[in-house]
């Protein structure tokens, strides 16, 4: 079908956040860009959301911010947040706009948000723009997460703005269209709590419950439901060697989705205290500390809901108990998930020691995280260790344990990916795109859509980086 015969782009908006009081957001349109050009469009996701795609020029105009589609209600959401432990009472969408919401084929509500769409009242000293690298990184990683089975925001479109943005140097500008179950964050509750706005807290509580947790009747119910999703999410991150890098409370989505892929990175060589983020000087958001930080973030969420309960002393006691239960919940989920990674379906005494022993040997033997676990079902695991004998010592007990498991190889192959968005490949892709070559981006998209399949033609993408290719630090998208 040629462009002239295509139906016009149509987004079936069904907006709700804009019906909340005006102190929840600031209404405005995106700042137009010079020459929007569509770089990537997620046709499958668009179909799920009931979006008629239209022509490339229409899509570029809408998702670049130059045209407000019918039914949209663009607004910048306000929130607060703890950033590396320090509280900022007002943050908000400084370079993003919620275009509106749609209902998918199952009746589930999703936000459609532009990132890099220009300044808002919450921009502080920022320019409200994004450059091409972080846009392509988030597009690639969020879709890879979806294919890996990790709850995540999604990418609908990436648009080249035809303009330069100034960072350390002039860089090509771009806009990402992000799809999320919502953009309600721990920091959204914190914003109104910090202002003593109990009326707004009650409104936000009702909205959050209706949208995400309809079975929750009390703030304690909501806290426990959110905790359950966060526990599952963070353990899932750890099971694929992922380090979020900026687990601030404004980046903790109450829907339980991965949100914001700024300094996000995957471990190559396993070590529990691995840090990539260039701004995480103390290792606050290291790989292993993510389990502790999510409990800390949930404590901040709990604190923000105390005014919603008449008996605050009782609420503090109940909320504290729920948060204090998190380490045990995380450990239990970690045992279950990592047991599957070594082929064990039903965890029993001694399995946690078996898992921990392997990880210790991986750290000491500088083993690649992804390839080591994948090789357990495919052979060649010992080759991942600088001293293969360290694996041999562990393997004997592991093989004996697997005698009681029905189909360990199939289980391991289903949970241990072959290919991940390795940091050096993502950086190489970005550099190619900046030079005008999008072939590496398109190739990574294709390969990462099937992360659990063996793809001989993509074997090079499974290799750890050479010493000269190692990414030492990752950076926020701003």
Image (cartoon, helix red, strand yellow):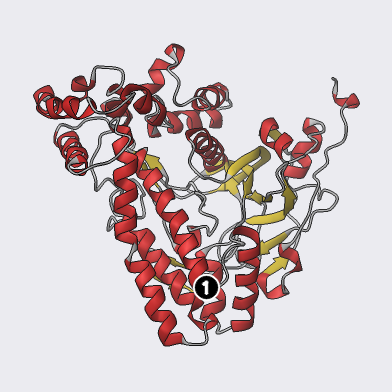
Residue visible at 47% across and 48% down? 262
Position of residue 351 in the picture relative to residue 332 (left or right):
left
Q: Say above or below: 218 vs 328.
A: below
**Most foreground residue, 74 or 237:** 237
Farthest residue, direction top: 457
Q: Position of residue 122 (x, y in %)?
A: 61, 66
Residue under the image location 26 percent in, 17 percent down? 379
Q: Quadrant of the N terminus?
A: top right
Residue toward you, 225 or 156: 225
* Residue under the point 54% across and 27% down: 445
How packed is label 1: few (under 14 Cα within 10 Å), some, or many (20 or more)?
Answer: many
List x then y, in percent, for residue 478. 52, 52
Number of marks in the rendered image: 1
Question: Is residue 301 depicted above or below 272 in this figure?
Answer: below
Q: Which residue is mark 1?
A: 219
Up/down of 375 relative to 235, above or below: above
Q: Position of residue 427 (x, y in %)?
A: 44, 33
Compared with 319, 10 (above or below) is: above
Where residue 8 sits, quadrant-wise, is: top right
**Residue 369, percent across and down?**
29, 33
Of residues 326 and 184, which is closer to you in this image?
Answer: 326
- Judged from the image, the secondary structure of the residue bearing numbered disc 1 is helix
Residue 90 visible to the viewer: no
Let me know if residue 30 appears in the view.
Answer: yes
Q: Quadrant of residue 79?
A: bottom right
């Amino acid at each position: 079908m040629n462009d002239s015969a295509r139906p016009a782009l149509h987004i079936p908006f069904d907006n709700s956040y804009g019906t909340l009081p005006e102190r929840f957001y600031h209404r405005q349109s995106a700042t137009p860009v010079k020459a929007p050009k569509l770089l990537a469009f997620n046709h499958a996701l668009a179909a799920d959301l009931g979006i008629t795609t239209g022509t490339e020029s229409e899509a570029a105009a809408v998702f670049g911010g130059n045209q407000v589609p019918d039914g949209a209600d663009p607004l910048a959401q306000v929130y607060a947040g703890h950033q590396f432990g320090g509280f900022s009472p007002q943050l908000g969408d400084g370079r993003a706009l919620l275009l509106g919401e749609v209902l998918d084929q199952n009746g589930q509500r999703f936000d459609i948000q532009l990132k890099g769409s220009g300044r808002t009242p919450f921009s502080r000293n920022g320019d409200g723009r994004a450059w091409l690298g972080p846009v392509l990184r988030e597009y690639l990683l969020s879709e890879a997460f979806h294919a890996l089975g990790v709850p995540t925001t999604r990418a609908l479109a990436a648009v080249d703005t035809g303009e330069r943005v100034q960072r350390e140097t002039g860089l090509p500008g771009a806009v990402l269209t992000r799809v999320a179950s919502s953009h309600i964050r721990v920091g959204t509750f914190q914003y109104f709590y910090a202002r003593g706005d109990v009326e707004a807290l009650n409104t936000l509580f009702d909205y959050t419950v209706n949208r995400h947790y309809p079975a929750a009747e009390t703030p304690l119910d909501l806290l426990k439901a959110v905790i359950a999703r966060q526990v599952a999410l963070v353990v899932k991150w750890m099971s694929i060697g992922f380090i979020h890098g900026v687990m601030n409370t404004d980046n903790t989505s109450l829907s339980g989705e991965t949100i914001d892929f700024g300094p996000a990175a995957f471990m190559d060589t396993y070590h529990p205290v691995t840090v990539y983020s260039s701004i995480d000087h103390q290792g606050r958001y290291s790989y292993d500390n993510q389990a502790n930080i999510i409990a800390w973030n949930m404590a901040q969420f709990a604190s923000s809901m105390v005014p919603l309960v008449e008996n605050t002393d009782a609420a503090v006691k109940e909320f504290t108990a729920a948060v204090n239960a998190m380490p045990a919940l995380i450990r239990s989920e970690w045992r279950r998930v990592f047991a599957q990674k070594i082929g064990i379906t039903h965890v029993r005494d001694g399995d946690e020691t078996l898992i921990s022993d392997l990880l210790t040997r991986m750290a000491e033997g500088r083993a690649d995280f992804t390839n080591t676990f994948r090789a357990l079902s495919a052979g060649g695991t010992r080759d991942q260790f600088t001293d293969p004998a360290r694996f041999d010592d562990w393997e004997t007990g592991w093989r004996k344990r697997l005698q009681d498991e029905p189909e360990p190889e199939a289980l391991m192959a289903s949970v241990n990916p072959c290919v991940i968005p390795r940091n050096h490949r993502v950086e190489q892709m970005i550099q190619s795109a900046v030079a005008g070559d999008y072939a590496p981006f398109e190739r990574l998209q294709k390969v990462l859509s099937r992360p659990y399949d063996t793809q001989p033609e993509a074997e090079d993408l499974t290799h750890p980086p050479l010493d000269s290719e190692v990414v030492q630090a990752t950076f926020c998208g701003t």
